[in-house]
Amino acid sequence: MLLPTPADLRAALSRYADAVIEDERRSTPDTIRQREDTAYTLCVMTGVSDVREALSTADALLSGGALAAEADRPDHSDAVPV
């Protein structure tokens, strides 16, 4: 599974939190759709199908799990593909 960058994951978590707050404050069809869209994005990014599991997985990844190891890898974007 491709792992999201810590910055991308944090941004998705922030967007989801904002959507939940807005939907809880004043629910409309637009806020419901935004909440569902951001939940789906988190699920895709973390490779799960439930938003609660996605939040848990995101927390685990950001707490020094796989993303920390990924961030320490050298960038080989200029490498010649084999």
Image (cartoon, rainbow, N blue to C red):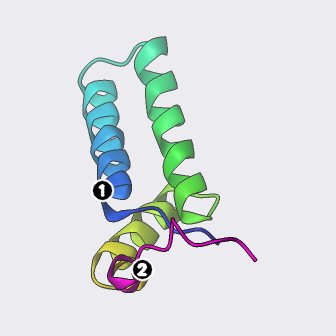
Residue 43 at x, y = what percent?
A: 56, 55
Residue drawn at x 51%, y 65% as measured from the top left: 77
Chain part drawn in magenta: 69-82
| Residue 56 left/right relative to 24 | right
- Report the predominant secondary structure element of the magenta stretch: loop
Q: Please, is residue 43 above or below residue 24 in the view?
A: below
Local secondary structure at mark 2: helix
Q: Please, is residue 74 above or below residue 50 in the view?
A: below
- Give the camera-side residue of 80 and 66: 80
Give the residue type that dot 1 points to. Answer: Ala
Give the residue type that dot 2 points to. Answer: Glu
| Residue 74 left/right relative to 76 | left
Residue 46 at x, y = what percent?
A: 53, 64
- Give the camera-side residue of 57 and 67: 67
Local secondary structure at mark 1: helix
Among the 4 quarters of the image, the one containing residue 47: bottom right
Q: What residue would you read off at disc 1? A: 7
Q: What residue would you read off at disc 2? A: 70
Residue drawn at x 45%, y 72% as measured from the top left: 57
